[in-house]
Amino acid sequence: MIEAVDSPYFIPAIAIIAFILGLLIGRALKNHKYQSEIEKIQVEKSRLANHVQNNNISFTEDNTIKAVQTRGRSGMALETDLKLGVITKSNATPKLDFSSIGIASEDAKDDLKKIDGIGSFIEKKLNSIGIFKYEQISRLTDKDIETITELIEFFPGRIKRDDWRGKAAELMSKKQA
């Protein structure tokens, strides 16, 4: 037996036998590793199959999935009742305080499109809430700006960034001169 240990083939033979044993044991363990999960899935599958057989499925109902709006165009969050599919704004429609900015009529309106950031679409929206003149825009308070942003569904912060108040004051002074 001592002579077999001294043989040059002894260590490679042991290595091959160890490799084969490791391979066989690894495969056996791998097969058993997922066996319990497979059994759980099969039980769940049979439970669902029985449920489908016991409950009639009606394909005449409207089973479509409908998208639900969660934000308005202005970025304001909307409250949504998913059960009823009713969308309401999170706050009541705000009212603009004309006592601070003044009241103007459509007869004497200014061309609001001359203010950077106001195009024909935004001008129409401003006119629809009662803003027609540069003087009104130049008198806006921060609260008024927030209210107008909500009413015309404009990008939050855009009125301040585009400096509508300053540009309206400039245009008003040019108009008077």
Image (cartoon, rainbow, N blue to C red):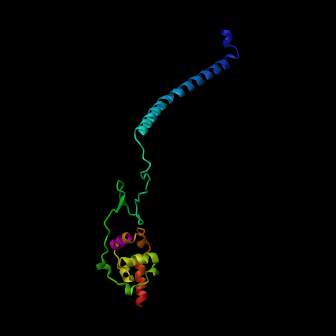
Q: Which residues are magenta?
A: 143-149
* The residue positioned farthest toward the bottom in the image shown: 177
Judge whether 172 appears above or below 68 on screen. below
Tell me residue 13's x, y (percent): 67, 18
Task: Name the side, left or right, on which 148 lies relative to 46.
Answer: left
Tell me residue 78's x, y (percent): 37, 61
Q: Please tell me which residue lies in front, 159 or 150.
A: 150
Determine if residue 129 is in view: yes
Task: Name the side, left or right, on which 127 lies relative to 30.
Answer: left
Determine if residue 118 is in view: no
The picture quadrant where one finds residue 148 is bottom left
Judge whether 139 appears above or below 153 on screen. below
Task: Name the side, left or right, on which 143 lies relative to 38.
Answer: left
Tell me residue 115's x, y (percent): 45, 79
Where the N terminus falls, by quadrant? top right
Please say whether residue 32 is one of the residues in the magenta stretch: no
